[in-house]
């Protein structure tokens, strides 16, 4: 049962909560080990909240998943895991997560509460509302980034909010686009909301979001106190364009985590991280 509970929590999706660590890096507190405890607690708490929501989502979609060729193998849909047990563990994980965030500080507790309610609304209703679905996903990433800053009581930068939102929106649009390319006429049977999107619409949304994302990140590097951050612009461009290439040319855009299997993306991400840390902490 515990194994099925863990599977239902989808730990492969928890990488999204790594956004929480952005605050401690860009606030120049990476070497302040006293603050790492709060950030790690925030990360674990958000993983528990995410896992709890995934369990609830599977519970709400049992009837649909039973008739799905792949999702029917999920613990709840297959009947291996009882609904009562799943919901009980979901409640326990939620209580533990809120207790952890409250132990850090009240601000983190409030943002975690907003995060949980937003994802709950998404699972119940908002995931079926066109455009709102991708906006909610993007806001979820922003809440994670803000949580990371609140956990260590540092100022939440407007650049952090806008760049995180735009990057998450860019990835969400890319995922929808890939689903339509891959599934074509059967897209609506995979995800009902895909019937509301069209290839032309998503192309226009991608163009707008990409342009604003590139401009926002570039402006951040121009106006930050360390002008050497401009060196990272080409890598940011490469990562964005590489993702677009993968959506169009390879079966790797359906889930953003698949990008970590592409050597080009892995290389650019690693180099970008090394450059950012090196510039922020060792070059004045």
Image: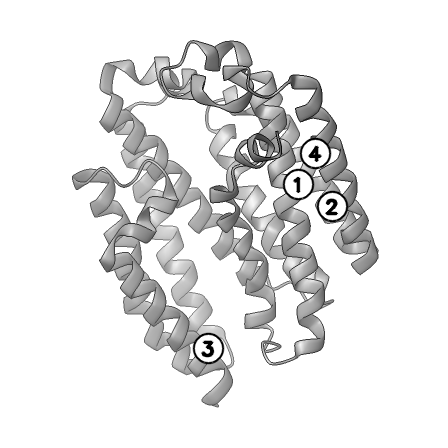
Residue 159 visible? The answer is yes
Q: What element carries label 2?
A: helix
Above or below, 195 against 224 in this view is above
Residue at 66% x, 63% y is 39
Residue at 50% x, 84% y is 281
Say which of 211 and 125 sits in front: 125
Q: Name the residue under label 1.
A: 49
Is residue 184 shown left or right of residue 156?
left
Above or below, 159 against 11 in this view is below
Q: Sequence-wise, which precedes: disc 3 or disc 4?
A: 4
How far, Cα to Cα, is label 3 from label 2?
A: 30 Å
How far, Cα to Cα, is label 3 from label 1?
A: 29 Å
Q: Is mark 3 on a helix, strand or loop?
A: helix
How far, Cα to Cα, is label 2 from label 1?
A: 6 Å
| Callout 2 crowding tier (Cα within 10 Å): few <14, some 14–19, many ≥20 | many
Q: Where is residue 29 in the image (x, y as percent from the top left)?
A: 62, 77
Q: Which mark is residue 97?
A: 2
Q: Where is residue 151 in the image (x, y as percent from the top left)?
A: 71, 61
Residue at 74% x, 41% y is 113
Above or below, 166 against 218 in this view is above
Say which of 218 and 149 sits in front: 149
Q: Are marks 4 and 2 in contact (CB under 8 Å)?
A: no
Above or below, 125 against 279 in this view is above
Q: Name the residue under label 3.
A: 277
Total labels: the figure holds: 4
Q: Sequence-wise, which precedes: disc 1 or disc 4?
A: 1
Q: Sequence-wise, which precedes: disc 2 or disc 1?
A: 1
Is residue 250 shown left or right of residue 134?
left
Q: Residue 117 carries which label?
A: 4
């Amino acid at each position: 049962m515990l194994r099925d509970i863990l599977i239902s929590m989808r730990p492969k999706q928890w990488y999204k909560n790594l956004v929480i660590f952005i605050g401690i890096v860009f606030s120049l507190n990476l070497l302040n080990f006293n603050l790492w405890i709060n950030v790690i607690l925030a990360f674990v708490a958000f993983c528990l909240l995410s896992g709890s929501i995934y369990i609830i989502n599977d519970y709400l979609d049992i009837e649909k998943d039973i008739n799905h060729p792949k999702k029917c193998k999920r613990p709840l849909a297959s009947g291996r895991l009882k609904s009562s047990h799943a919901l009980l563990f979901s409640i326990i994980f939620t209580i533990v997560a809120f207790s952890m965030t409250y132990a850090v500080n009240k601000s983190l507790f409030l943002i975690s509460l907003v995060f949980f309610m937003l994802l709950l609304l998404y699972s119940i209703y908002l995931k079926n509302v066109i455009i709102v679905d991708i906006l909610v996903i993007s806001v979820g990433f922003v809440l994670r980034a803000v949580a990371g800053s609140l956990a260590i009581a540092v100022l939440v930068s407007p650049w952090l909010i806008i760049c995180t939102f735009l990057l998450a929106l860019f990835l969400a649009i890319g995922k929808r686009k890939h689903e339509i390319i891959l599934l074509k006429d059967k897209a609506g049977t995979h995800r009902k909301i895909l019937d509301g999107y069209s290839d032309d619409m998503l192309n226009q949304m991608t163009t707008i979001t990409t342009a604003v994302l590139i401009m926002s990140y570039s402006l951040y590097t121009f106006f930050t106190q360390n002008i050497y951050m401009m060196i990272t612009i080409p890598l940011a461009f490469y990562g964005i364009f590489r993702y677009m290439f993968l959506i169009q040319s390879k079966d790797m855009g359906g889930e953003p985590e698949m990008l970590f299997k592409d050597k080009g993306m892995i290389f650019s991400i690693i180099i970008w991280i090394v450059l950012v840390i090196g510039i922020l902490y060792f070059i004045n």
